[in-house]
Amino acid sequence: MKNVEELDRTRELETEGIGHLLWKYALPAVISQIIASIYNIVDRIFIGHGVGALAIAGLAITMPIMNIIHAFGSLIGVGSSARMSIVLGRKDVKWAEKILGNSMIFTIILGFLFVTCGYLFMDRILTSFGATAETIAYAREYMYIVLPGMFFTTMTFNLTGLIRASGYPMKSMFIMIGGAFINMILDPIFIFGLDWGIAGAAWATTISMTLTAFVSILHFIQPSSFIRFKAHAWQPKGYIFRNITLIGMSPFLMNVCASFVVAMLNNQLLRYGGDLAVGAYGIVNTFASLMVMLFIGICQGMQPIAGYNYGAGHADRLKHVYMLTMKICVLIGIIGSSVSCLFPGTMVKIFTSDHNLIRIGIPAMRFLMVMFPLIGFTIVNSNFFQSIDKPWIAIVTSLSRQLIFLLPMAFIIPIIFTHNGLNGLTGVWAACTISDVMGAMLAAALLFSQRKIFTDLTPHERKVRKEAGPEE
C-alpha cells in the first residue's frame, strides 16, 4: 500500500501538462548543469588571472581526462536514471530500488579503476593529450589532487540523476548549488589567500564534490525518501548492469570520444599554433561546455517525462515533450551563438589579459560557436533516444559529429588550408564548424527513420510496456 501511495510522486508525469512538467523538471536540471560547469569556469578564471596563460593551457590539457571521468558518471547516471523513469512508468518501485543499489555498486567498481589507472599512468596520459615541457607541471599538479575527488563527482552525477528521476528535481538542484557555492568560496581562499596556485583550484573542487556526494547519499538513507537503499537492492544483478550500460553507453562513448578528439585537436593546435592555441581552445571550450550543459540540463528535464510516458505507452505525450524540448534548445543555441560571434573578444577577456591569447581566441570563438543551434538539435535527439531505451540510435547520433566527421576533418582541412596559402590554425577551427553541420544532418536522418515512435501505440504494445518485468 505504501508503494502505491508513493507512486503519486511520479504519476504526475502522465497526467499534468507537458509544458508545466518540462519547466518543473528542466529548470532544476539546467541550474544543476550550469552549477556543475561553474566548477570549471571558476577554476579557469582564477587560474588565468592568478597563475598565468601557461597554467590555463595546462588546465586545458586536463579537460579530456576530466571528460573521460565524467563519461563514467554519464554511463551510470544517465543509464540508471533513464531506466528508473521507465520502470516507474510501469509502477515497479522494487525494481527502481534495485537500480539504485546496483548503480552504486557499478560506481564504486569503476571509480576505483579509473583513480588507480590515473595515478599509475599520469605522465603518459598527460603527454598523449598534448602536454609539453612548459605545461605538464601545471596539469600534473592539478590532476594529482583532483583525481580522487572525481570518484565522488561520478557518484554525485549518478545519485542526483536518480534523485531527479524519482520525483525530487528541486532537491537534486540544491545539492549541486551547494557544492558550487562551496567551490566558489574555497577557490579564492586557496589560490590567492593561501597562495596554492593551481593546486588550490584542485583542492576546492575536490572538497566541494566530496561533500555533495555525501549529501546525495543521505537522501537515499532518509525514511522520507521515495526510493531508498534496501538490502535486496545491493544484490548484483547482471540484467540491471546490462540495462544501465546499454542506455548509458551513448553519453559514455560521446564523452570518451570527445576526450580523444580534444587530445587530437590539442596536438593539431600545437602543430599549427603552439601552446597559446591550446589555451585559446580551452577558453572557448569552457563556453561551449556551458552551452552544452544548458542543452543537457533541459534534456535531463525531458528524460523522466519521456521515459515514464514511453513506459506507460503515451505516444502523444512523448511527441509533445520532444517537440517542446527541441524548440527550447534550438532557441538557446541561436542566442548563445549570436552573443559569441558578436562579442568574442569580450568573452575571451573574462579569462585572460594576455594579448596574444586574446588574438588567437577571437576567431576560435566564432568558428566553434557559430553552429550551436545545430549542436542543440543533435544533443536533443541523442538524449531523447537514450530516454526511450533506443541506445544504438542514441550512440550513432551522439558520436557522429566528433568521431565520424571531426576526427578526419581536423587533419584534412588544415592541410587543404596550408596548401592554398591559408592559415593552418584557421583550418583546425573550420573543421569544427563543418563537423557540426554534418553531424546535425545525420541526426536528422536517424530521427526520420524512427518517426513511427510518435504514432499511437497499439493496445498490445501498451500492455507489453506496462507489464514487462526485468530482463533477466
Image (cartoon, helix red, strand yellow):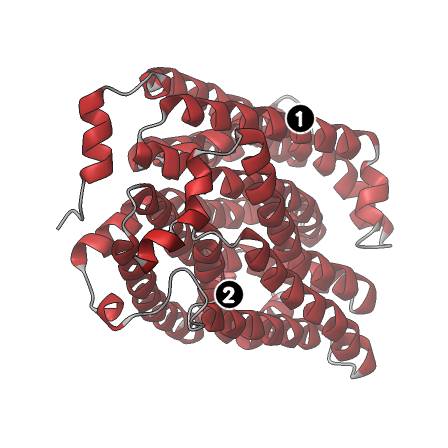
Is 144 left or right of 202, judged from the image as shown?
A: left
| Residue 11 visible in rendering | yes
Alpha-carbon span between mark 2 and mark 1 = 30 Å
Is 246 left or right of 165, judged from the image as shown?
A: left
Compared to residue 261, the image places residue 405 above or below, namely above
Mark 2 secondary-structure assignment: helix
- Which residue bears the numbered disc 2? 153
Mark 1 secondary-structure assignment: helix
Q: Earlier in the sequence, mark 2 or mark 1?
A: 2
Compared to residue 211, the image places residue 83 above or below, namely above
Front position in the image: 13 or 62: 13
| Residue 426 visible in rendering | no
Front position in the image: 364 or 375: 375
Q: Say the numbered circle drawn on residue 331.
A: 1
Is 82 left or right of 465, judged from the image as shown?
A: right
Compared to residue 414, the image places residue 38 above or below, namely below
Residue placed at 87% from the left, 54% from the top? Answer: 353
Residue 242 in picture, x, y percent from top left: 22, 51
Q: Quadrant of the N terminus?
A: bottom left
Residue 205 in picture, x, y percent from top left: 62, 70
Q: Residues within 10 Å of mark 2 (few under 14, many from 20)?
A: many
What is the three-letter code of the residue carrying label 1? Leu
What is the three-letter code of the residue carrying label 2? Thr
Residue placed at 48% from the left, 73% from the top? Answer: 218
